[in-house]
């Protein structure tokens, strides 16, 4: 499978498949495909697995697209302004992503729900403690809100972030929630919680979570008509 990412702030990844190769994606992300692609929609591993994805913010069903001849193309587009990041899974690395991070992947990639058992991380600053887990061997494509910032954390190195800005991380990265210190900081500062990420491992941060973008647009939305 070969791919190309284009489109600037409204990106699309175009994958070129050879006969027998298969891509999977969440329903609604497919933009186009050539005529010799076969589509099959199912839960991707059983009903319980599909329900688990729903709790992580994904869809119950996955679409599987298989090329029935060589050089077939399929495009998957992001649903929000941002970036598409490609990650190659090699069978030993595991990626943990935010809710709705999954865009598409080769069918050899497993998409599962990821639960965080620590109490602090369970709060996750109001962003939800159920995440997505990606394992296997193949290409994975995640959609990121806004621009993406990559951080390679050394063992024991930590950074504090707003919870909504954490897009994805390697499984080796430990994350927890830290309460903001000081009453004035909590009331008039950046919120009640920070996410604390501790290495080793890579972290992908997003500059404009879609929830933050929606909040920024509210003052400019027209008022509903009076009845």
Image (spheres, helix red, strand yellow):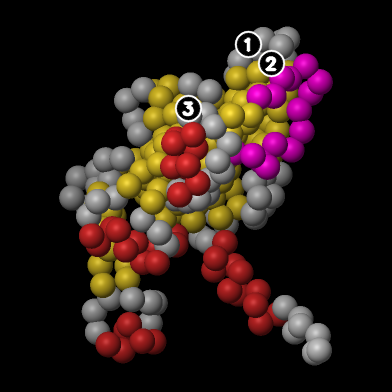
Question: What residue would you read off at disc 2?
Answer: 67
Looking at the picture, how far across and down is residue 177, in whole percent?
27, 63
Image quadrant where one finds the N terminus:
top right
Quarter assignment of residue 214 = bottom right
Question: What residue would you read off at disc 3?
Answer: 45
- Residue that extends furthest to the left in the rendered view of this protein: 156
Vertical position of residue 68 compared to residue 180: above or below: above
Q: How far apart are marks 2 and 1 (CA)?
A: 5 Å
Q: Give the range drawn in magenta.
A: 26-40
Question: What residue would you read off at disc 1?
Answer: 20
Looking at the picture, how far across and down is residue 27, in whole percent?
64, 39
For the question of whether residue 162 can be seen, the reply is no
Task: Say which residue appears at 34% left-offset and 30% top-offset.
Answer: 93
Looking at the picture, how far across and down is residue 63, in whole percent?
63, 31
Q: Which of disc 2 and disc 3 is earlier in sequence?
A: 3
Are there few (<14), some (14-19), or many (20+) residues within 10 Å of tag 3? few
Vertical position of residue 152 compared to residue 34: above or below: below
Q: Quick one: SS at disc 1? A: loop
Q: Quick one: SS at disc 3? A: loop
Q: Quick one: SS at disc 2? A: strand
Task: Say which residue appears at 42% left-offset and 62% top-offset.
Answer: 127
Indicate which label's residue lies in the foreground, 1 or 3: 3
- Residue that extends furthest to the front in the rendered view of this protein: 47
Figure label count = 3
Task: Say which residue appears at 26% left-offset and 40% top-offset.
Answer: 172
Q: Which of disc 3 and disc 1 is earlier in sequence?
A: 1
């Amino acid at each position: 499978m070969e791919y190309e990412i284009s489109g600037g702030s409204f990106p699309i990844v175009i994958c070129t498949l050879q006969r027998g190769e298969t891509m999977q994606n969440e329903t609604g992300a497919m933009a186009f495909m050539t005529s010799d692609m076969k589509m099959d929609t199912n839960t991707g591993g059983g009903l319980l697995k599909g329900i688990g994805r729903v709790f992580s913010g994904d869809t119950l069903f996955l679409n599987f697209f298989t090329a029935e001849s060589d050089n077939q193309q399929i495009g998957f587009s992001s649903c929000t302004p941002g970036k598409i990041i490609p990650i190659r899974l090699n069978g030993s690395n595991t990626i943990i992503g935010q809710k709705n991070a999954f865009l598409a992947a080769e069918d050899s990639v497993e998409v599962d729900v990821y639960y965080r058992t620590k109490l602090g991380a369970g709060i996750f600053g109001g962003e939800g403690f159920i995440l997505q887990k990606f394992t296997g061997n193949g290409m994975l494509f995640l959609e990121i809100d806004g621009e993406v910032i990559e951080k390679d954390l050394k063992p024991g190195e930590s950074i504090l972030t707003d919870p909504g800005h954490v897009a994805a991380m390697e499984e080796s990265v430990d994350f927890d929630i830290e309460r903001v210190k000081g009453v004035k900081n909590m009331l008039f500062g950046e919120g009640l919680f920070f996410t604390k990420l501790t290495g080793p491992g890579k972290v992908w941060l997003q500059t404009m979570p879609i929830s933050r973008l929606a909040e920024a647009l509210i003052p400019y939305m027209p008022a509903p008509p009076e009845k």
